[in-house]
Amino acid sequence: MTESSANKLLNGDACHRTANGRKASKNGFVKNHCLFQQPHKYRRPREKNQNVTHNSSLYKKPFSESFEETPLLVAVLTYMGYGILTIFGYLRDFLRHWNIEKCHVARERDEQKDFVPLYQDFENFYTRNLYMRIRDNWNRPICSVPGAKMDLVERVSHDYNWTFEHTGKVVKDVINMGSYNYLGFAENTGTCADAAIEATQAYGVGVGSTRCEMGNLDIHEEMEQLVARFLGVESSMAFGMGFATNSMNIPALTGKGCLILSDELNHASLVLGARLSASTIRVFKHNNMQSLEKLLRDAIVHGQPRTHRPWKKILIVVEGIYSMEGSIVRLPEIIALKKRYKAYLYLDEAHSIGALGPNGRGVVDYFGLDPKDVDIMMGTFTKSFGAAGGYIGGKKELIDYLRRHSHSALYATSMSPPVAQQIITSMKIIMGEDGTTLGADRLRQLSENTTYFRRKLREMGFIIYGNDDSPVVPMMLYMPAKIGAFGREMLKRNIGTVVVGFPATPIIESRARFCVSAAHTRETLNTALEAISEVGDLLQLKYSRREQPLPSLGWMSEESLLQD
Amino acid sequence: MALGDCWKQLSWFYYQYLLVTALYMLEPWERTVFNSLLISVAAMAVYTGYVFMPQHIMAILHYFEVVQ
């Protein structure tokens, strides 16, 4: 979807060629001395396979991503399914409006019917008529640690998901394929939990102030120095909430007259932060370096919209791993572009810190690059460290500036001490400074699990998006009824999964998202894979049209894959 | 045994039909409405075909001068 339209964009440029082969430059067109040359032949890709890296000299190991294209029949049937649901949605809204059926949605009182409307009825059409019908797949209450296995509270609904009741029973030992528990630190026993208990006994749980007033504890300073050492940057600062880190710090970094170039599929926190900052925002196609380069060149040549003054700064905002696609950012190419065009880079490593790279230091480690090339490294502690909160790392002047000017530092309560202690302990384990090999074992287990899980799902015939090394595995479902059916069937087989539909994904590309964890053993993964295969056959989810390599060599092929 | 297998197979096909047309997400009375509409339209199409097919076939054969 993105790649073929990017190709069409590039081919428009390729048509303006003069006789001697050099591009005629007209007013308003930028000459094409691009760093990353666009493909000149019109190729309609069967799949959006990004295996061909145009600049393979920048990558030390093969970068293989694939986003197989939606089969046409499946797309048509999905639209038909949504059409039928829309028609029945209109019918139900009609019945509700004329009071033939009981209306569970919030409405104004009768005395207020003449006022300006308070509730926007049509905006919630999707929520009322599509989301509510399969709402039992989300917000399931968990009553244990969300580790590799968890316990769920059993709920039942008697009025088609408008209200739920707890039956009083607990579903035990549900395999957890949905939590962001990449290194398995979500546990209530072990060194991390013991250290957190000690911290609670020393400091209490609440801090009772903001960082800049009375809330700056020595445990925060220790944690920030540790984070800076972990990332390989000069200094870092931590905040209580990952979403707030993005949305409150981007306004402190850019303002009016600056340009933000953000990826198409950036997270809501980045989009919110960019909008709050009042900078101009331009969006480039997902992970597409030609699109980014074109935007950069146009921005530098044309300047600000009406005055044509040069931009005060240009900030490229990307994520390490995109959690809905499972794709990894093309960091070497972005750094090459950033250096050439003198822009700044903001890297959001929410999912990739601790999960990628031989030492667990994130995307920068995965590609073998220098952390000093990334101007602002942001990340969260929620995913791989089993805590909560976010951090920003960079040069000392930048972090000192943020300490004084960030909204989060000035107004938000600082991080709770047991959470900070959990971060310190888990980070020391990952770095290997606690004297055991637990960190290295977990990192290796995670990458083995990822490779195994992805390979097995591909072999079974499902359409899996994303890079082969990313622990986030989105599996395509497409049809709206299969979203609900998949979630429920997996729960019947005691596996908890996350299913995602519109508006988090494009309307026909709904998916189930698995998060592989180092806490999963090979047996757990095999159980899960069997159940997924069974449900896939029952629901006819094996859409992939690629030929699978023959599984002839068995143990030998598995070993060669693990050698990486 | 064969009838049991046949019933299972039909039941699986009905389940696939429910999933593809998104009837799986609808309440039972909505499924009844949709199924009856679909069956009545299909029945009307079959009946029209049954009534008019001989005339259409005669017209085609007349056009190709197979029969006068």
Image (cartoon, coloured by chain):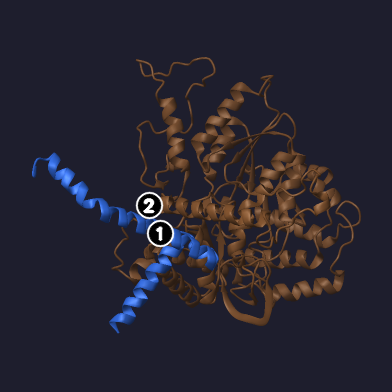
Chain colours: A brown, B blue
Foreground of the two, A107 or A64: A107
Q: Position of residue A437 (x, y in %)?
A: 59, 71
Residue at disc 1, secondary structure: helix
Q: Residue at x 83, y 51 (%)?
A: A111
Q: Left or right: where does residue A87 sit relative to residue A544?
A: right
Give the residue pinned by disc 1. B40
Q: Are marks 2 and 1 in contact (CB under 8 Å)?
A: no
Using the rendered view, name the quadrant where residue A425 is placed: bottom right
Q: Position of residue A351 (x, y in %)?
A: 60, 56
Q: Residue at x 40, y 59 (%)?
A: B40
Give the residue pinned by disc 2. A73
Classify 10 Å Cα crowding around label 2: few (below 14), some (14-19), many (20 and above): few
Quadrant placement of the C terminus of chain A: bottom left
Residue at disc 2, secondary structure: helix
* Tag nearer the camera, 2 or 1: 1
- The reply to whether residue A234 is visible in this rendering is no
- The reply to whether residue A2 is visible in this rendering is yes
Residue A497 versus residue A23 in the image, above or below: below
Q: Left or right: where does residue A174 sit relative to residue A530?
A: right
Foreground of the two, A113 or A187: A113
Classify 10 Å Cα crowding around label 1: few (below 14), some (14-19), many (20 and above): few
Q: Residue at x 9, y 42 (%)?
A: B68
Residue A297 versus residue A454 in the image, above or below: above
Residues at marks 2 and 1, CA–CA distance in whole angstroms: 26 Å
Q: Position of residue A17 (x, y in %)?
A: 39, 20
